[in-house]
Amino acid sequence: MILHAVYREGRDARLPCLVWLHGFLGSLREWEAVSEHFLDWPQLRIDLPGHGKSADITASDFHQIDQLLRKTLLSYNILKYWLIGYSLGGRVAMVHACQGENAGLCGLVVEGSHPGLADENSRRERQDTDQFWAQRLRTEALKEVLNDWYQQPVFQTLNDSQRAALIALRSQNNAATLAAMLEATSLGNQPDLRPALVHMRQPFFYICGEWDEKFRAVANSLALTPHLITAAGHNAHRENPAAFSACLLNLLRKPGEDTP
């Protein structure tokens, strides 16, 4: 079994493939506008389990998700690649980078994503919180749950029209499969990846919106200087796609890396 994905050939076959991983509630369509700025690179946009056209694919933990990701990459014969992940997608990318053989991984870019909780009490609290949301997804109207979801502090920079647009878009999801994925990928279940990430041999870049105070602090905890996207909060690539794309292009073209 492999994940649903959309592959696009690049203008320069020598370049590594850009593998795009969306956040919770999203789909591969999240990256459509951004991916148009990277036509030199081969690209693979993936629907994670429980989302988009991978909604009928289940995974019980990060290890299973990583195995699905690896099988999907192999099915497209992708042997050299960058992982670019937002929020949940960034966590999947970081888990991938920290386990198993990654000879083909050329670099890692995460946006607004958490490397894991070190404190056991914090883990339990997060598990309880995610189980609460999962139960709501299973028992209440999806639109009502999403309305409350986007009132969380991490989304405080959204205005009313942005919030309404996200709710309308996300209301097309399958609530039951989202609930299962939320439980499987709870931050409370994720290993603390900081020790492994600090010793990564591949390039590792962290992007976040300038208004996203929570994840600016997370980047600092990794001893990384975050690349800030102006006029954006947690979902920077959606709120300011032009600035996000310009930032990412610059990172991919840093000295010593493949350039078009």
Image (cartoon, rainbow, N blue to C red):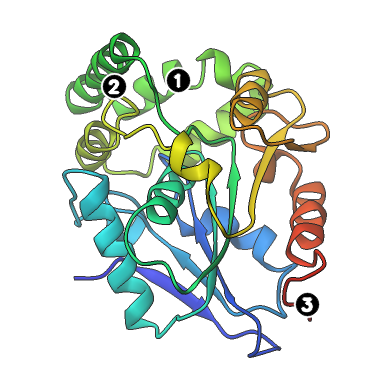
**x, y (%) of residue 153?**
56, 13
Q: Residue at x 25, y 19 (%)?
A: 127
* Amino acid tagged 3: Thr
Query: Would residue 130 appear left or right of 105 to someone viewing this image?
Result: left
Q: Nearer the viewer, mark 3 or mark 2?
A: 3
Q: CA distance from mark 1 to mark 2?
A: 16 Å
Q: Nearer the viewer, mark 1 or mark 2?
A: 2
Secondary element type, mark 2: helix
**Labelled disc at residue 130:** 2
State if disc 2 and disc 1 touch (CB < 8 Å).
Answer: no
Q: Residue at x 66, y 27 (%)?
A: 220
Query: Would residue 175 appear left or right of 82 to someone viewing this image?
Result: left
Q: Measured along the vertical axis of the image, is residue 190 above or below residue 27?
A: above
**Labelled disc at residue 259:** 3
Q: CA distance from mark 3 to mark 2?
A: 41 Å
Q: CA distance from mark 3 to mark 1?
A: 43 Å
Graded by Cα atoms within 10 Å as few (under 14), some (14 to 19) or many (20 or more), the crowding at tag 1 reads some
* Amino acid tagged 2: Asp
Secondary element type, mark 3: loop
Graded by Cα atoms within 10 Å as few (under 14), some (14 to 19) or many (20 or more), the crowding at tag 3 reads some
The residue that mark 1 highlights is 147
Q: Measured along the vertical axis of the image, is residue 11 above or below residue 95?
A: below
Q: Measured along the vertical axis of the image, is residue 260 above or below residue 229?
A: below
**x, y (%) of residue 230?**
83, 35
Q: Residue at x 76, y 42 (%)?
A: 240
Which mark is first along the chain, 2 or 3?
A: 2
* Amino acid tagged 1: Asn
Toward the viewer: 88 or 26? 88
**x, y (%) of residue 226?**
72, 36
